[in-house]
Amino acid sequence: MEIYKKQSLSETFKVYYDIRMLRILLLGAISGFPWVIIGSSLSLWLKEDGLSRSTIGWAGLIFAVYAFNYLWAPLIDRVKIPWLTEKLGHRRGWIIIMQSIILVSLIFWSLINPTTNLALVISIGLIIAIASATQDITVDALRIEQIGEHEGKSMQAGAAMAVVGWWTGYKLGGVIALNAADFFQNLGFENYWQTTFLILGIVIIACNIGLMFINEPQHLERTESQRQTDKMIEDKLGSSNIMTKSAAWLTGTIVGPVISFFKKNGFNIAIAILGFVFLFKIGEAFLGRMSVIFYKEIGFTKSDIALYSKGLGWITTVIFTLIGGLFAIRSGVIKAMFVSGILMASTNLLFSLLAWYGKSELLFAIAVIFDDMAAAFATVAFVAFISLLVDRTYTATQYALLASIGTAGRTTLAASSGALVDWLNGDWGIFFILTALMVIPSLIFLYMIKDKLKLNE
């Protein structure tokens, strides 16, 4: 499916020079950083305190809240934060509140031990995940609203920059976390991870400062459209009083975004879109959930992981995300989805080679480079795809709905990744082959609906 006419590569690349892309880059970093905290940092913290692979895998269920953030996304679209909304803007006010919750949670983590307080550690991790998932609702809406509704080329470039930003926050955040933990461990700190969480808290503060440099557009049309929806529902209720006004507001807030999505695409296509979104990144999630454990088990140190998986991986991700954005612009987002899905499946097999060969820095570097290349292509295509589907009247809610359904597949099913490795008796090679096969059902879904999709060009 072609969305844009072909143009020269230099003309295509000029879209990245827009100042809005820099703001989107920062928003992506703010969104990606919390995944370091409840992802690799929490996993290694639990691993080095003697907890099992299965326990670590099931602890990852806290990521499942990302799959359900659409439930409260309508409130994020409508409810204003007292004082902060007036001073900073609707979106930025919500982000500041969530960042503050994450900061306080990190301080609590720095005071406890997971071996004696595992339930408390996981509970605080759940609070971080909820705050991060809520923050993502607002970050994604603010990112989409930086671009005009029919600036399709800029939207796809913005998706690329958002992905670069996300991986920057995730990868460089991982470099900071792993190197800090290694540094404090070598200094003889017994609770070196707890000290590391205080360092990560400083990064959160820096993110809040950076947020102040991002403009928040005022969208009076969105407010007026939402008001008209409320009025239409109120009229259908047949009277006007405090009860009907409240019912109209609640119904418009919760049901309006869903009705809009199904009305635009039609019921069958809408269901197929949701099925594709749910399945697309399951294999990547299984690999990602267990990758840091795999690296540790075959003999790599935290510093090795920081260098190859985080540092080298970040450079690769940035380069191939920008290339992926250009590919999506020139070839169309649908073709980009197919290519990236095939790349994801193929590159997962490189980890099977590493598992069978044993510790090898060369193979490790190759696997990380190609895996991050595939992940970059897949993520930028996926973000552009769902960004082009949303109705600007319900930006936060519809994007959150689509993104959370994608997250549902990655988090709920991938929670069994550790158990799968244990069931395979630690046969990492077979495990990675299975992750490669997991992308096939989603591509079948996409093939079925590719000619019937309605995207905002």
Image: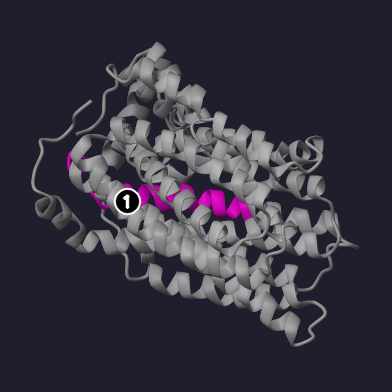
Q: Give the side of residue 105 with respect to residue 282, left or right.
A: right
Residue sitting at x 27%, y 17%:
451
Quarter of the image containing the N terminus? top left
Quarter of the image containing the C terminus? top left
Q: Position of residue 403 (x, y in %)?
A: 47, 38
Secondary element type, mark 1: helix
Q: Quadrant of residue 434?
A: top right
Q: Does residue 326 belong to the magenta stretch?
A: no
User: Residue 186: in sight, yes or no?
Assistant: yes
Q: Position of residue 88 (x, y in %)?
A: 37, 65
The type of colouring in the image is: one colour
Q: Main secondary structure of the magenta part?
A: helix
Q: Give the side of residue 113 with respect to residue 269, left or right.
A: right
Residue sitting at x 45%, y 58%:
167
Disc 1 marks which amino acid?
Ala
Q: Give the side of residue 53 with respect to residue 361, left or right.
A: right
Q: Position of residue 271 (x, y in %)?
A: 45, 17
User: Residue 93: in sight, yes or no?
Assistant: no
Residue hosting label 1: 160
Instruction: Give neighbour class at mark 1: few <14, some 14-19, many 20+ (Cα, 10 Å).
Output: many
**Magenta residues (range):** 128-151
